[in-house]
Amino acid sequence: MNNDKTAMEQEMESLKKENDALKETVRIYQNHLEKVIEHQVVENYRSVVRKNRETDNTVSLVTSQPL
């Protein structure tokens, strides 16, 4: 009986270590994913700003020409 308990405790400790390692892996991937999403949002914002500036410049050129 005592031998079974020891084996069970060892298995529990092994599973706990594996669980901790998986938690750390999830934390790392989550951090990476957040950075990727943030980068994508920034790039999207830059693209929108660039398009708006191009539109503003086009409108400025058209309105500044004499009729």
Image (cartoon, rainbow, N blue to C red):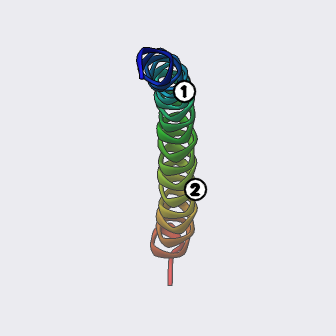
Look at 42% across and 23% down and name the residue there: 1
Q: Where does residue 28 sit, x and y in percent of width and height?
A: 54, 27
Give the left or right position of residue 18, taking residue 13 as reference. Answer: right
Q: Amino acid at mark 2?
A: Ser
Q: Amino acid at mark 1?
A: Ile
Viewer-nearest residue: 31 or 42: 31
**Crowdedness near tag 2: few (<14), some (14–19) or many (≥20) residues, C-alpha within 10 Å:** few
* Real-space CA distance between mark 1 and mark 2, rounded to the nearest whole angstrom: 29 Å
Farthest-out residue, front: 1
Look at 53% across and 48% down and name the residue there: 46
**On the image, which quarter does residue 12 sit in?**
top left
**Crowdedness near tag 1: few (<14), some (14–19) or many (≥20) residues, C-alpha within 10 Å:** few
Q: Which mark lies nearer to you, 1 or 2?
A: 1
Q: Which is more N-terminal, label 2 or label 1?
A: 1
> Is 53 placed above or below 62 here?
above
Q: Secondary structure at mark 2?
A: helix
> Is 1 placed above or below 50 here?
above
> Is 48 placed above or below 8 here?
below
**On the image, which quarter does residue 61 sit in?**
bottom right
Q: Where does residue 13 sit, x and y in percent of width and height?
A: 47, 17
Look at 52% across and 68% down and name the residue there: 55
Q: Secondary structure at mark 1?
A: helix
Look at 50% across and 16% down and name the residue there: 3
Viewer-nearest residue: 24 or 65: 24
Viewer-nearest residue: 46 or 4: 4
* Mark 1 lies on residue: 28
Q: Where does residue 47 sit, x and y in percent of width and height?
A: 57, 56
Task: Mark 1 and mark 2 in contact? Answer it, CB < 8 Å.
Answer: no
Q: Where does residue 44 sit, x and y in percent of width and height?
A: 53, 55
> Is 29 placed above or below 54 here?
above
* Mark 2 lies on residue: 47
